[in-house]
Image: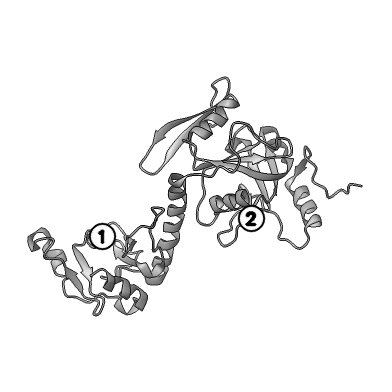
Amino acid sequence: MRFNYDLLPGELLTFEEIALRYAQQHPEEKELTARGLLSPSTSYRHLIIRAVFAQQELNSPLEDLLIVSDDNERKNYLRRFEHYLKTGQTFLYFRRNDDGRKSGRWKVIGETQVYAMLDPSSAAAQNLLSSRGYKLVLMRQTEEEEYWQLFDRQAHPCFPLSRRIQFLVVLSTPQQKMPAAVMPGTEVGRRVKARVLQRASQAEFSSAVRARYGACIITGTRLTERHSWPWVEACHIDTQENEEGFLADNSVDNGLFLRSDLQRLFINKMISIDAETGQVLFNHALESDASISLFYQALEGKTCVLWDAVPPGTRQRLRNLR
C-alpha cells in the first residue's frame, strides 16, 4: 500500500509538498532546501546529498545530465558528486522546465545515482552529447574560465548566453538506468580538479590568512585602507607542489598577508623576512640596490609591524626558505 508521503516518479509537486513528504519519510534528517542545485545547498565539511533540484534553464533539456557552473569551497559539489559516484549511494532527483517554473512545480525523477562525471572539453562529453543530437561548443576562453554554448538538434542555443561550465554529471535515473555513450564510473581529470579544487582551496586559504592578520604584516596597512597601491593579499611562503600539481601546503601557517606590491617582491625573492627577528631583508645577491626604489629600500632592517602575530609554524616555514 502506498501512502501519501511517497515521492513517485513523474509526479508534479510544489517544493513545499516535496519537503513535507520528505520530512515524513525522514523525520530524523534536516529539512530539504531548494536554494541551489544540491540540498543541502552548502556542505563544505560533509559529503551529503539529500536531493538535487535541477532547473532546465540552468542545465539542459536532457534529464540525465547536470551542468555544474558555480562550484566553490562552500558548495563542495565536485567532492560530493565524486563521493556518490564511488559509493553508489542514491539521492532524490527533481527537475523543473519552463512550465514547471511558471506553475511552481517540480517533476519527481526519483532515486538517482551518479553514473559518470565529465570534463566539458573531453571526447567523452562530446560523444555523449553527439549521441543525443546535441553539440557543446566553446565560445570564448579567458586565462581561468571557459564559456560554452549547448546547441540542440536544430542548432538552436539552449542557453540565453554562453556560460561557464566546470564539469558535467551524468545520472542513472529510474527512467534511464544506464546512459548510453559513456563509460560508467568515469571521473573528471586533473585539469577540472585543479580549476575547481585549487580555486576553492585558495579561497579558503585567503580567508583564513586574512582573518588571522587583517593587515599587511610588514607595514600594518589594513585591508580597508585607501592607498595608491592595489590591495592587501594572502600569499604562500612554501610554493612546492604535490604529485597532483596542487600546492602541497595550503594551511594558514604557510601564508602571509602582504600589501600587493610587497607581495610581488616577496614572491620574486627580492625581499625576505628573517624568521628569528621579523626584520625585512633585501636579496642583494639577486638584485642590485639600484633596481629597488628608495621607497622600498627604506623598509630594509625594519621589523614587521605585526611580527608578534606571526605564530611559530609560520616562522618555521620562513626559516625553511633559507
Q: Nearer the viewer, residue 294 or 275?
A: 275
Q: Is residue 63 above or below residue 255?
A: above
Task: Mark yes or no: residue 161 visible.
Answer: no
Does dot 1 land on a helix, a strand or a loop?
A: helix
Q: Mark 1 = which residue?
A: 267
* Amino acid tagged 1: Ile
Does dot 2 land on a helix, a strand or a loop?
A: loop
| x and y percentages locating residue 302 in the rendered image | 19, 75
Q: Mark 2 = which residue?
A: 40
Which quarter of the picture shows residue 235? bottom left
| x and y percentages locating residue 213 in the rendered image | 37, 71
Instruction: Identify the residue shown where x is 65% and y is 34%.
Output: 179
Count of numbered tags? 2
Q: Residue furthest top?
A: 154
Instruction: Identify the residue shown where x is 18% and y is 71%.
Output: 281
Instruction: Identify the residue shown where x is 43% and y is 54%.
Output: 198
* Amino acid tagged 2: Pro
**Could you classify mark 1 by the number of other residues whose Cα lies within 10 Å: few (under 14), some (14-19), or many (20 or more)?**
some
| x and y percentages locating residue 156 in the rendered image | 55, 23
1 or 2: mark nearer the eye: 1
Q: Nearer the viewer, residue 281 or 84?
A: 84
| x and y percentages locating residue 322 in the rendered image | 23, 70
Q: Is residue 230 above or below residue 141?
A: below
Instruction: Confirm or deny contact between disc 1 and disc 2 (CB under 8 A).
Output: no
